[in-house]
Image (cartoon, helix red, strand yellow):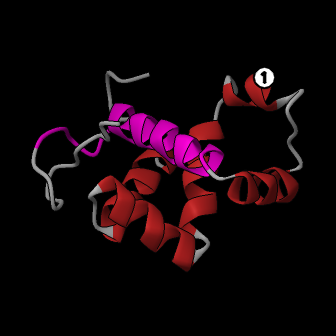
């Protein structure tokens, strides 16, 4: 699976904008879902379940919450970053892009 590339990271390409952050959050959710124990812990911590995960994913802030969850668990962050071919700092920068105000002209 392709992961978004972040400018100034170990990969060159896309900016650290919201779109790249959202794409990386999708990759992080896919990473969590690939392992039943990781997914169960994520669902437990967030209070989500199979019945409301899709609705939550459509909500504002969901992408940031997924990356926040990954960043908040250093061993999980390290594994996700390694499997994605990114530096952990790239994931943190993507989270910061999602948590900050959108740049002018971006929704």
Q: Nearer the viewer, residue 95 or 51?
A: 51
Q: Nearer the viewer, residue 51 or 35?
A: 35
Q: Residue at x 81, y 50 (%)?
A: 43
Return the x and y of residue 25 as percentages of the image width and height.
50, 42
| Picture quadrant where residue 93 is located | bottom left
* Magenta highlight range: 13-34
Residue 15 is inside the magenta segment: yes
Q: Nearer the viewer, residue 59 or 54?
A: 54
| Quadrant showing the C terminus | top left
- Residue lying furthest left: 12
Return the x and y of residue 29 as percentages of the image width and height.
58, 43
Q: Residue at x 27, y 58 (%)?
A: 85
Q: Residue at x 40, y 48 (%)?
A: 97
Return the x and y of residue 79 as percentages of the image width and height.
45, 68
| Picture quadrant where residue 106 is located | top left
| Picture quadrant where residue 18 is located | top left
Vertical placement of residue 107 versus 27, above or below: above
In the image, 57: left or right of 86?
right
| Label 1: how many Cα within 10 Å (few below 14, some 14–19, many 20+) | few
């Amino acid at each position: 699976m392709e992961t978004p590339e972040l400018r100034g990271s170990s990969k060159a390409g896309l900016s650290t904008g919201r779109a790249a952050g959202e794409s990386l959050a999708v990759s992080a959710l896919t990473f969590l879902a690939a392992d039943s124990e990781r997914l169960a812990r994520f669902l437990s911590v967030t209070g989500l379940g199979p019945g409301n995960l899709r609705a939550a994913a459509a909500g504002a802030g969901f992408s940031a919450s997924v990356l926040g969850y990954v960043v908040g668990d250093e061993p999980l962050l390290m594994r996700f970053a390694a499997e994605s071919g990114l530096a952990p700092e790239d994931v943190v920068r993507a989270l910061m892009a999602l948590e900050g105000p959108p740049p002018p002209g971006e929704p």
